[in-house]
Image: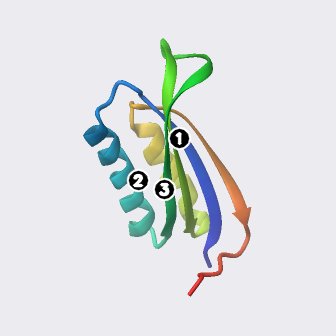
Amino acid sequence: MLRHYETLILVNPDLTNEENNEIVENLKKVIEDRGGEVITVDDWGIRELAYEVRKHTTGRYVRFEYALPPTEVSEFERRIKLNENIFKFLTVKLSDKYKKNS
């Protein structure tokens, strides 16, 4: 059974578009390899932060909306933590059951 989640990540703003796209593609691959489905990925661009994080006052926000088995969310978050270019992240469960829009 898949559950519906949303994760917002804060990425180093000094990365090139290619490096940012590589991070996004790697995270999408983690979701798909774990039996999940990527619904949408929104790049909100570089925005000013409310407070300094790792000596940066700006960061690139990327939002993932996906469906994943609940037992695999911790592995997805672990992969996020391993990437030194991701400052912060927040995962929210949107729904207990994911219904595919066919």
Residue in the picture at 39% in, 37% down = 83
Sequence-first disc among 1 and 2: 1
Residue, disc 1: 9
Residue, disc 2: 27
As drawn, 63 above or below 20 = below
C-alpha separation, residue under disc 2 versus residue under disc 3: 10 Å
Q: Quadrant of the C terminus?
A: bottom right
Residue in the picture at 58% in, 44% down = 8
Residue in the picture at 56% in, 53% down = 74
Q: Are marks 1 and 2 in contact (CB under 8 Å)?
A: yes
From the top left corner, tell me how far across and down residue 7 is, in percent: 58, 50
Considering depth in this image, is 83 or 44 the residue closer to the camera?
44
Residue 68, label in figure? none
Under tag 3, what secondary structure?
strand
From the top left corner, tell me how far across and down residue 35 is, in percent: 46, 73
Local packing at callout 2 (Cα closer than 10 Å; few below 14, some 14-19, many 20+) is some
- Would residue 1 be found to the left or right of residue 78 on screen? right
C-alpha separation, residue under disc 3 versus residue under disc 1: 11 Å
Tell me the amino acid under the disc marked 1. Ile
Tell me the amino acid under the disc marked 2. Leu
Residue 19 figure quarter: top left
As drawn, 2 above or below 102 = above
Considering depth in this image, is 75 or 7 the residue closer to the camera?
7
From the top left corner, tell me how far across and down residue 6 is, in percent: 62, 55
Give the colouring mode of the picture.
Answer: rainbow
From the top left corner, tell me how far across and down residue 49 is, in percent: 59, 22
